[in-house]
Image (cartoon, rainbow, N blue to C red):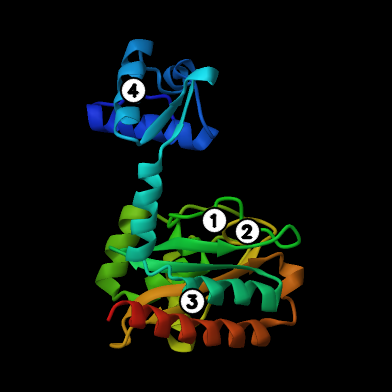
Amino acid sequence: MQAETPKGPVERSLMVLEVVAERGGASAREIADALGLPLPTVYRIANTLAESDYLVHIRAESRYELGHKLHQLGQSLHKQVGMSRPVAREITRLHEDTGLAACLTVLRGAELVIVYVVDSPSCPRLPTMRFGFHDVPHSTAFGKILLAEQDAAGRDLYLNRHGMRALTANTITDRCELDAELSDVALRGIAWEHEEFLAGFGCAAVPVRGPDAGLIGAVAISARPERLAGREQTVEAKLRNVATRVAACLRGAQR
């Protein structure tokens, strides 16, 4: 997090919450140092948030931790994105059946956003692949699913806004090359990413579609390349089966 002075009270309050969340709790001094805010300002914001149950003040330790209101907001968000227990079980089963890290993304506005990840010590998720991640779609498998869904004008607008920066030596930064790959993704209904987002990891994703065949999400796996080598057909079949079942779960939740 950048230590910039926020402009308004709402932004300051949100950034205080973010510091407390990132650190698993923080003192007023730690918050002030992280955000470059005066200590009295931090006390005022933190105490207001504590009065509303967005923070809790652990007086014996002179620190603030997250309050239960945020848990309520989180539960509401998970309901909105369709993260029901049956959906979670499908993603967990995908991880268990393949031994690969597995995740679900859902369409939120114009982005495919990660809403659930299952991994293990033997096959951990990519370090940044956590709830809410949606960046650099040209370099991720589920991002390619999103881009392949767009027409030429929509893809132009998206890529002109976000760019195509190189993250590894394998990242596709040439627009013609990316367009050719996205055409293949649209035709085959699966996207692969070979160490394009993070060196030492590969990913695959397939779309999750609604009753009108429109894109509503994607199911993806990730692992080190040696764990994927020779398993492409098996991985693809499992991804497609799980995507079909997840789509049925999501459609049922929307009725």
Tags 3 and 2 touching, CB below 8 Å: no
How far apart marks 3 and 2 lie (CA) works out to 21 Å
Give the quadrant of the C terminus. bottom left
Count of numbered labels shown in the rendering: 4
Residue where numbered disc 1 is placed: 129
Residue where numbered disc 4 is placed: 47
Amino acid type indicated by mark 3: Pro
- Residue 179 locus on image (x, y percent): 42, 73
Neighbor class of circle 2 (other Cα within 10 Å; few <14, some 14-19, many 20+) is: many
Q: Is residue 219 left or right of residue 163?
A: right
Q: Is residue 167 left or right of residue 231?
A: left
What residue is drawn where x is 35% and y is 43%?
69
Looking at the picture, does residue 163 appear above or below residue 47? below
Q: Nearer the viewer, mark 1 or mark 4?
A: 4
- Residue 121 locus on image (x, y percent): 73, 57
Residue where numbered disc 3 is placed: 86
Looking at the picture, does residue 135 appear above or below residue 233? above
What residue is drawn where x is 42% and y is 18%?
32
Amino acid type indicated by mark 4: Asn
Neighbor class of circle 3 (other Cα within 10 Å; few <14, some 14-19, many 20+) is: some
Amino acid type indicated by mark 2: Arg
SS class, disc 4? helix
Neighbor class of circle 4 (other Cα within 10 Å; few <14, some 14-19, many 20+) is: some
Tags 1 and 4 touching, CB below 8 Å: no
How far apart marks 1 and 3 lie (CA) works out to 22 Å
Amino acid type indicated by mark 1: Met
What residue is drawn where x is 55% and y is 51%?
128
Of callouts 3 and 2, which one flags the residue occurring earlier in the amino acid sequence?
3
Q: Which mark is residue 125?
A: 2
Q: Nearer the viewer, residue 36 or 147?
A: 36
Of callouts 4 and 3, which one flags the residue occurring earlier in the amino acid sequence?
4
Q: Nearer the viewer, residue 83 or 232?
A: 83
